[in-house]
Image (tube, coloured by chain):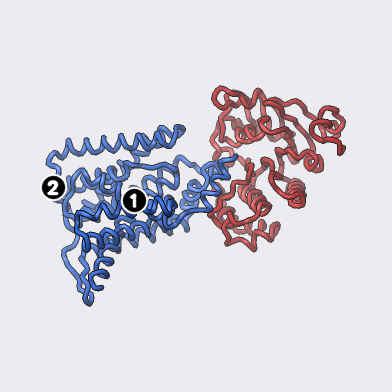
Amino acid sequence: MVDFIQNTLDGIFIGSSYALLAIGFTLIFGVMRRLNLSYGPSIMLGVFAGTLLYIQLNAGLLVVGLATVVGAVLAGLYVERICFWAVRRGAALASMVSSFAIWMQLEEAVTIVFPDRTYPFPPLADFTLKLGPFWVRGEHLIMFICASLLTILLHLLLYRTRFGLAIRAVSENPTAAKFMGINTGLVVMFAFALASVIGGVAGYLIASTDQQVTPLFGLWATFKGLIAMTLGGMGSIPGAIAGGLLLGVIEAQSVWYLGTEYRDLVAYAVLFAFLVFRPGGLFAQKSAMQSRLAARRV
Amino acid sequence: MAVLEINDIVTAYGKIEALKGVSLSVAEGKITCLLGPNGAGKTTLMMTISGILKPQRGAIRFNGQDLAGKPARTVVGQGVALVPENRLVFPEMTVEENLKAGAYLRRDAGKVPSDIASVYERFPRLQERREQYAGTLSGGEQQMLAISRALMARPKLLLMDEPSLGLAPLIVEDIFRIVRELNNEGTTIFLVEQNAHMALQVAHHFYLIEQGKIVFDGSPDEMEEDEVIKRAYLGSKV
């Protein structure tokens, strides 16, 4: 029982970073109704910007973090211009395919500049807390606190500010949002930037926990975010949080009870089960789907 | 005096011209109604005026300013607000958030709360449901919300695209009573309708559009006297 609870705790801590990735995915999916497969790779670019400053200039934690976020935002905006703005009148599939192409491009670009594959990333904290029979790693605790703070900030932005209202309006009905005088193109760009900030923070937290990065980080981040978003329900922020935590706990339990090699196998099995039995995810948006169908009749 | 003047507007979807040179004008302080069957181009015209669709050609002059091809935010900023077909309220926002979205471009944010209060005065039902998601409202309530949301922009010209669509007859009467009320308070209204009988009770001037062209332009009296219109749009009741 102690093991099970310890695994659950570990899973929730790790899962908080998955939740951030899923929130980023869901924000972009919310305003675009399109998948951005390049989301993970654009974060990877940010992480490598951070690691570059770390190995070349021995930069401090704050500078590395800032470089990671700025790099992720710039890469995210690049993806938005190429894969979404430029083909906004084309089919949704066009965006997905071009975001896959840009993924390959970003990965290649990073591999050319960083030919050694694996690079160091500065650790955030090196302590372990003991709470009764349970252990909590310092970097996990920081990860969880940062993720929670960021989620609260995002909630305030979306529900307490004028621009947040505009983002929600565009997510619910872009045409109606235009009738309100909302500059939807600007809102989409801002949503991408926001998702990239969140992704950059997640990337920083994860890389500093692993203390190393490889160009495969992009693939990893896209998969984790995509799975967590699908488990929770696409386009739903509470869903993204729940999906991220659930994925973290599933992984931690299967590593403990079945072994590391089964971690992804179990995660994909759960994803498959969801797709078959609950395709809308934990927080299926029934009313939103219905109104969207109604809007399509216009 | 004409507040809105539309001159020879052509709007196409790909190669298919939905509007084939539409010209009309909307007089200040009046209710102007555009009648026409499904697919005649009514909603296309509304979308073109609102800045969602770009016309191939032609001019849209509002208070002397050319709005043709300008983005929707410019059109709203100039004082033209639309109550869209099928209402298009934001279903997962509360009633009050919908109203705030309608005031998005307003620079006088301080006056927005009092405008929301006067919306609630006009529609007590919306006040009762102010914290409710708009998606949970009935069709009539959603239409009232869509009208109120457009009013939050304090428009000089209110465009209404088939406000009676899909509503029960009693609710339709309510909606048209509100249309007349808003007009009496000084708002110029350009109304698109299929319900010719209801429109006859409120509008001061009529246009009829068929297959992308204006085929009739006249007063309510002239419309009632026109044999073709009588047969096609007013049926045996007149």
Q: Residue at x 48, y 53 (%)?
A: A285
Letter of the blue chain: A
The image shows residue A113, relative to residue B134, as above or below, that is above
Is A39 displayed left or right of B66 in the figure? left
Q: Residue furthest bottom?
A: A132
**The N terminus of chain A lies in quadrant:** bottom left
**The C terminus of chain A lies in quadrant:** top right
Place of residue A260 in the rendered image (x, y in percent of width and height, measured from the top left): 19, 56
Q: Residue at x 71, y 45 (%)?
A: B164
Secondary element type, mark 2: helix
The front one of B231 and B106 is B231
- Classed neighbour count for the residue bearing mark 1: other residues with Cα under 10 Å, few (<14), some (14–19), many (≥20): many
**Circle 1 residue:** A227
Give me the C-alpha separation between circle 2 and circle 1. Answer: 32 Å
- Where, by quadrant of the figure, is residue B124 drawn? bottom right
Tag 2 and tag 1 share a subunit: yes
Secondary element type, mark 1: helix
Residue A18 seen anywhere in this rendered image of the structure = yes
Q: Disc 2, disc 1: CB below 8 Å?
A: no
Place of residue A13 in the rendered image (x, y in percent of width and height, measured from the top left): 27, 63
The image shows residue A106, relative to residue B24, as above or below, that is below
Is A240 displayed left or right of A166 in the figure? left
- Where, by quadrant of the figure, is residue B141 drawn? bottom right
Letter of the red chain: B
Label whose residue precedes the other's in the sequence (2 or 1): 2
- Where, by quadrant of the figure, is residue A296 drawn? top right
Place of residue A50 in the rendered image (x, y in percent of width and height, measured from the top left): 21, 48
**Circle 2 residue:** A55
Place of residue A276 in the rendered image (x, y in percent of width and height, measured from the top left): 40, 51
Kind of residue indicated by mark 2: Ile
Residue B107 seen anywhere in this rendered image of the structure = no
